[in-house]
Image: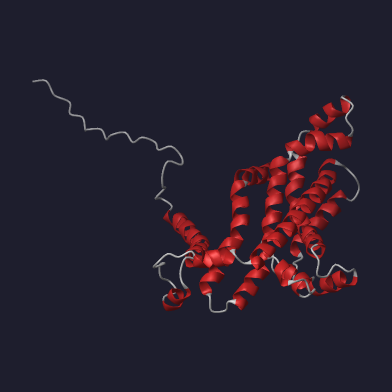
């Protein structure tokens, strides 16, 4: 009688899951940390936005409650305040001026460091890197005295110029690797065609550097929009009218004027953060591209 070979049933073949097609449950700790980080970042912002739709009495009775009923009174009161729009104007002037100064001066300094070979280039780059370790709080008192002596206390330029100076180290650190990664063959080809170095800078270098410029511009604008200490030292201590204080200072003044109106304070804070958040989200892809180019460079 012929023997019959018995084979064990084969297990169904597992299909390899493509990367990024779901959760990797083999790393639950990573997802837990990411979830906690998202909650820490999102929950306070969501609380402020939702709190603006609540009445002050409801907030005092139950700070963690849900709006019942939803009301727009706080937002309408803030939008109808001349002080709020004066603060929006001041923050816009300071933010745009700071961004323009940071981008213009930063790209020129980074271009020289990245594309020119001269004695002391490494020391100059190290000087900008050292500026990252020099906080504004250390220079608060001498900076205030200097601005007062040169007549910039209580003015927009008194805020813009120091903010540009303190943002330049980060700008140069980001732009130097980005500009250095642009092939030298492009500059050689431009020189053969009769283009000067200034022409190469304006016609070729700047268009190719748009992702990096957008990155440093957004960082400078958001940092200026959220700045509190420097406007406090220059505007509040310099005697500038309160209607022209920037938004972070305006929040303080609004909460002082309506000390019991917590809903209006939360609504003011929500509206104050919207422009910077919208600007950041609008340029998010270019920011990632600029940082990626800087890392590759």
The quarter of the picture where residue 272 lies is bottom right
Which residue is found at the position 22% from the left and 33% from the top? 9
Q: Residue furthest top?
A: 2
Which residue is found at the position 81% from the left and 34% from the top? 203
- Say whether residue 12 is visible: yes
Q: Is residue 30 left or right of residue 142?
A: left
Locate residue 123, reporting x and y percent: 85, 54
Number of labels in the image equals 0
Q: Does residue 219 lie above or below 51 as drawn? A: above
Which residue is found at the position 83% from the left and 32% from the top? 187
Colouring: secondary structure
Locate residue 48, reporting x and y percent: 51, 66
- Judging depth in this view, the residue of 220 and 149 nearest the camera is 149
Q: Is residue 199 left or right of residue 33?
A: right
- Judging depth in this view, the residue of 157 and 297 nearest the camera is 157
- Say whether residue 138 is visible: no
Q: Is residue 12 left or right of residue 153?
A: left
Q: Is residue 65 left or right of residue 263?
A: left
Quadrant for the C terminus, please: top right
- Judging depth in this view, the residue of 99 and 22 nearest the camera is 99
The quarter of the picture where residue 179 lies is top right
Locate residue 102, reporting x and y percent: 77, 53
Quadrant for the N terminus, please: top left
Locate residue 158, reporting x and y percent: 81, 65
């Amino acid at each position: 009688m012929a023997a019959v070979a018995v084979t064990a049933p084969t297990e169904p073949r597992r299909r390899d899951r493509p990367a990024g097609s779901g959760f990797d449950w083999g790393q639950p700790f990573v997802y837990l940390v990411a979830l906690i980080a998202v909650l820490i970042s999102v929950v306070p912002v969501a609380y402020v936005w939702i709190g603006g739709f609540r009445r002050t009495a409801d907030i005092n009775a139950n700070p963690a409650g849900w709006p019942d009923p939803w009301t727009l009174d706080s937002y309408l009161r803030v939008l109808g305040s001349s002080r709020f729009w004066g603060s929006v104007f001041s923050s816009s002037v300071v933010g745009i001026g700071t961004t323009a100064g940071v981008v213009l001066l930063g790209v020129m300094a980074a271009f020289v460091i990245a594309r020119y070979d001269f004695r002391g280039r490494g020391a100059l780059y190290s000087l900008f890197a050292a500026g990252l370790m020099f906080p504004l709080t250390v220079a608060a008192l001498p900076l205030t005295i200097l601005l007062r002596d040169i007549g910039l206390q209580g003015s927009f330029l008194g805020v813009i110029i120091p903010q540009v100076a303190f943002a330049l180290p980060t700008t140069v650190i980001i732009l130097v690797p980005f500009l250095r990664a642009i092939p030298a063959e492009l500059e050689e080809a431009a020189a053969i065609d009769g283009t000067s170095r200034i022409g190469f800078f304006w016609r070729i270098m700047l268009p190719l550097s748009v992702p990096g410029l957008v990155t440093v511009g957004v960082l400078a604008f958001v940092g200026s929009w959220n700045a509190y200490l420097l406007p406090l030292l220059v505007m509040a201590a310099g005697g500038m009218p309160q209607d022209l204080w920037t938004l972070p200072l305006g929040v303080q003044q609004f909460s002082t004027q309506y000390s019991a109106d917590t809903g209006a304070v939360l609504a003011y804070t929500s509206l104050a953060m919207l422009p910077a958040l919208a600007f950041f989200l609008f340029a998010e892809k270019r920011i990632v591209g600029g940082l990626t180019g800087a890392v590759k460079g």
